[in-house]
Amino acid sequence: MTLSPLPEEWKTSSQDLARAWIDRRCLPVPAHRPGSIADAYQLQEAILVHLKEPIGAWKVGIAPEWGVWGSPLPCAALKTSQTSFPPRVVRGLEVELAFRLSPQVLEEEEKPLSEEAFFHEGILEMACAIEVVSSRFLGWPHIPELWKLADLQNHGALFLGSPVPYDPDFPYLNPPVSLQAEGNEQARFPSGNPAGDPRALLLPFLRQCRERGLPIEPHHWITTGSYSGVYFLKSSGRIHATLGNLPPLTATLLLSPQESATMDPSD
């Protein structure tokens, strides 16, 4: 990844955030802040450079004030079903829908596609996912939105279930959803995605990535926002998620005692 020149204060912030990611700790929010989405994106890229990790996946969502935005995710934070690991300052869990795009669409940069055409030929696979919501900042979630974006959009890890071929008839607006953690059902009902149909996020985000010179690769997965609401895990244990008729996803999270004592920001 080629990094654009950074102002001195951003160099320090990106180094600090990368170190906080590695050490699983939280930092005070800096006095300065990103002034635009472009600033936040530049910080994201710098963090990945400091981590010395390739991009493994992407996180995309929608913000009322700014529209579609997202973050690259470090390769090491991409997990599979039945995985146990000590998460980096875990905050919460969300059931999401992840997509893998068609290689043909990714290669044909000059071919303009309508949303309808993209829905027909632009998506290759889909999978149930569990997003681990996390932060490298003290006081989260009550911090500036652009700092959240710069901090890899509150990303901690992404668990992926078994993929299936793309289904255009999947109930994207309100699929049945379940999140079982700590022995109980934790998903909020009725289900729904902040973007409505999460597929609508993919084409604008693909164009953004091309404009930034960070092309989405055929092996990359893109996760697209919560269907379940966020559940703040209080102890280690198995988690189980289902979304529509997709293969279910089971994983195990191991929390340190210190992390377990500071999970829910609403406490």
Image (cartoon, rainbow, N blue to C red):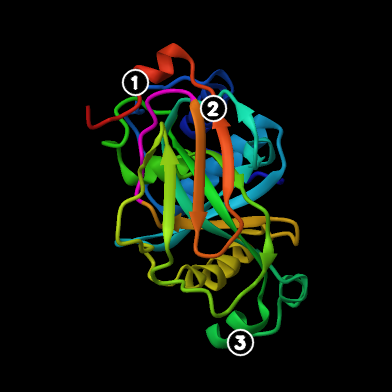
Closest to the camera, between mark 2 and mark 3, is 2
- Mark 3, Cα crowd under 10 Å, few <14 / some 14-19 / many 20+, is few
Reading the image, the residue beneath label 3 is 117
Q: Is residue 234 magenta?
A: yes
Q: Which mark is residue 262?
A: 1
Can residue 34 be seen from the camera position used here? no
Along the polypeptide, which appears first: circle 2 or circle 3? 2
Find the distance from the CA under tag 2 to the CA under tag 3. Answer: 39 Å
The amino acid at mark 3 is Ala
Find the distance from the CA under tag 1 to the CA under tag 3. Answer: 46 Å
Is 258 above or below relative to 8? above
- Mark 2, Cα crowd under 10 Å, few <14 / some 14-19 / many 20+, is some
Reading the image, the residue beneath label 2 is 87
Along the polypeptide, which appears first: circle 1 or circle 2? 2
Magenta part of the protein: which range? 229-236
Is 29 above or below relative to 1? above
